[in-house]
Image: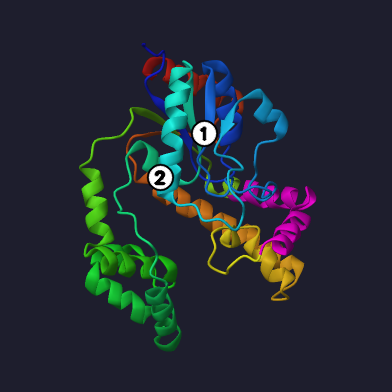
Amino acid sequence: MTHEFDKILAILGPTAAGKTELSLNIAEKYRAEIISADSMQIYKEMDVGTAKASKEIMNRVKHHQIDIIEADQNYSVADYQKDVDPIIEGIFKRNKLPLLVGGTGLYINAVLKGFTLPKMEPDEVLRRKLRQKAEEKGNKYIHDKLKKIDSKLADKLHPNDLRRVIRGIEIYKLTGHTKTYYKDKQKKIPPRYRSIKIGLTRNREQLYDKINKRVDLMIEKGLIKEAKYIYNKYDLDKKSTARQAIGYKELFNYFEGQYDLNEAIRLIKRNTRRYAKRQLSFFKRDENIKWYSLSKLTNDKLFEKVNYYLQKNI
């Protein structure tokens, strides 16, 4: 049986760039089903802070990979790849277009390019030991340890990015190979799917302004109440992924009296802006992304241009 579509379309970019509106227009034009590539929208009940599509939008276009686990459950990049493969197969069988939409670059890469890190159980003893050493001797001490093992990775990571620095050491201790080794290995593997990647961005000032306004809107829509509900319902471990979600982490700390509400909101805005910057840095490394700036285009003009590009390439 031949399928009308044989490629996956990915719409990606930083938070608040404008992915949702474009993806809905594309989905309706090309009979697509949307697969969320957002590492926080997988959590049930975390709706306002993760900017999930409304029920009305989800009725308009079928969405996958939203609300699939509880906030206290673990979910890895490898889990995402395993879950999404049969979804893509089903969409192709229905003669529809699989449309990956989101800002979690690792999710998108795991599906389109592959995921080469072997499955490893976290070494909590090692992590605890390294965190303790960092407290005693400073983050630079742990960063220097990584530098001796994997200098390329160490050069990319700030000593204060302790979680990733420790992860780099852990990968080497558990597998005998560095994270850089696995990244180089991945580059030699052919893609898992044929794909078209559309990247959306805005100039920094506009993007940051949109982020700030978006956070204010989330507060209006009930983010504090939602975060309080999650906080009371789950005994979230400090290291759990859901606990680290921007918008929730800052409010949880506010509930615990670490700072006042104004400071929590300021930190949500700041941390979201920083996250957007990291997302852009991650995606800019991919030469196969066709970029469009919404600073220069209206939504209608963007759709027109992307539609023209897709008709020649899909």
Mark 2 residue type: Phe
**Nearest the eye: 157 or 176:** 176
Where's residue 58, x and y in %? 65, 30
C-alpha separation, residue under disc 2 versus residue under disc 1: 18 Å
Question: Which quarter of the figure has residue 172?
Answer: bottom left
N-terminal of the pair, mark 2 or mark 1, is 1
Tell me which segment is drawn in magenta: 208-234
SS of the residue at dot 2? helix
Residue at horizontal 49 percent and vertical 41 percent from the top:
13
Q: Which residue is mark 1?
A: 35
- Specify how the rendered protein is coloured: rainbow
Q: Is residue 230 visible?
A: yes
Q: Which residue is mark 2?
A: 283
Residue 303, relative to residue 181: is it above or below? above
Question: Which quarter of the figure has residue 20?
Answer: top right
Q: Is residue 193 magenta?
A: no
Mark 2 or mark 1, whichever is nearer to me: 1
- Magenta region's main secondary structure? helix
Residue at horizontal 57 percent and vertical 69 percent from the top:
238
Q: Quadrant of the N terminus?
A: top left
Residue at horizontal 41 percent and vertical 74 percent from the top:
127
Q: Quadrant of the C terminus?
A: top left
> Callout 2: 10 Å neighbours few (<14), some, many (20+)?
some
Q: Is residue 214 magenta?
A: yes
